[in-house]
Amino acid sequence: MIRRAGILPSIYQPPIAMIKPKLIKQFLVEPGTEVNLKDYVTDWTETDEAKELGTDVIKDRASLILEENRKHLDSAQELLYASDTHSVLLIFQAMDAAGKDGTIRHVMSGVNPQGCQVFSFKKPSAEELDHNFLWRYMKALPERGRIGIFNRSYYEDVLVVKVHPEWLGPGQPADPDHRFWEKRYEDINNFEKHLSRNGTLVLKFFLHVSKDEQKRRFLERLTNTEKHWKFSGADLEEREHWKSYQKAFADALSATSTKRAPWYVIPADRKYVARALVADIIATAIQDLKLEFPKVSPEKMALLDAAREKLEGKDKDKDQKPQS
Ligand code: ATP
Ligand code: MG
């Protein structure tokens, strides 16, 4: 409660459920640390602190936290738009079937659709490959007042492409060495620094799913007719490269988690845990911007007063008419 009370204007309801910052910290990649993904859980309900609570309690709390933070996000978006000083960029990366789509849908479902935009990045076109690797993402950045969501992002250019360097495109080295990737990390860090300096809050989420859970979700897509459409032959091919992907993720997270644009490794084997965590992190980070509604100048205030008096006067006239 203390975290949000008094900082945001009255449209903010005091939160009744939030996650302790100490817990959130476990999922943050501290800038400058070497990430080993084995140190991060994929199923948070298997941790000692979670076992103490039990799955039913966690499920209930998670849905409450998600609900509360959805409301906060909607209010925060309105404030973001009104104050017109910042934008928010949310980046989601993961292995296939980790739940990017569902997390985005659930976390953002309460937000005014006019205030947010989602871009899903697929394999780049020939035109996109003819530009620098950040080009297509620059065109999709949120303007001030908006929340922009990248479902996959320029991180693909140091992840999938690192696993498959043959997809780098024309004019790129056939066999890139480690310096090539380090330069890309550096470009990304500089890009995000530029965004942050220009008022964009950047938050990055790696939805960390286990290989077993991915298998379970693929099987669900293969057996449930309503989920058939979600399965692609490429999914199994990429699963074969699981280890290389985990290494590419660990390298990218180690090199690009910064104070200005931090990475969170979100345990994603339980969808309700992932959604509650992501919603809480976003709502808290926007709150920490300490945005305010624009102050009304004395001239504007006089204008508002005059307009109100005029309207009220007119309504009085109208009310009185039938009597005359
Ligand atoms: P779902 O989780 O529903 O499968 P998705 O995000 O995986 O959604 P797909 O259309 O299945 O969407 O896959 C998009 C593909 O595009 C991914 O395999 C991804 O690795 C690839 N891709 C994205 N960006 C790049 C890039 N810069 N270079 C090469 N491939 C890319
Ligand atoms: Mg896919």
Image (cartoon, rainbow, N blue to C red):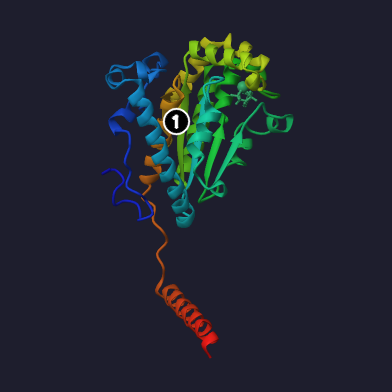
Residue at the far front in the pictured view: 323
Residue at the far bottom in the pictured view: 324
Give the total of numbered labels.
1
Q: Is residue 44 toward the left or the right of residue 323 in the image? A: left
Residue at the far top in the pictured view: 240
Residue at left 29%, top 52%?
Answer: 6
The location of residue 125, given as percent across then percent down, is 71, 30
Residue at left 45%, top 36%?
Answer: 203
Q: Is residue 157 toward the left or the right of residue 279 in the image? A: right
Query: Residue 198: in sight, yes or no?
Result: yes
Residue at left 60%, top 36%?
Answer: 119
The quadrant in which residue 141 appears is top right
The location of residue 22, given as percent across then percent down, is 28, 30
Q: Is residue 80 toward the left or the right of residue 44 in the image? A: right
Of residues 263 and 80, which is closer to you in this image?
Answer: 80
The location of residue 250, given as percent across then percent down, is 45, 19
Tag 1 residue:
275
Q: Is residue 303 toward the left or the right of residue 119 in the image? A: left
Query: Residue 259: in sight, yes or no?
Result: no
The location of residue 128, given as percent across then percent down, is 69, 32
Of residues 53 and 105, which is closer to you in this image?
Answer: 53
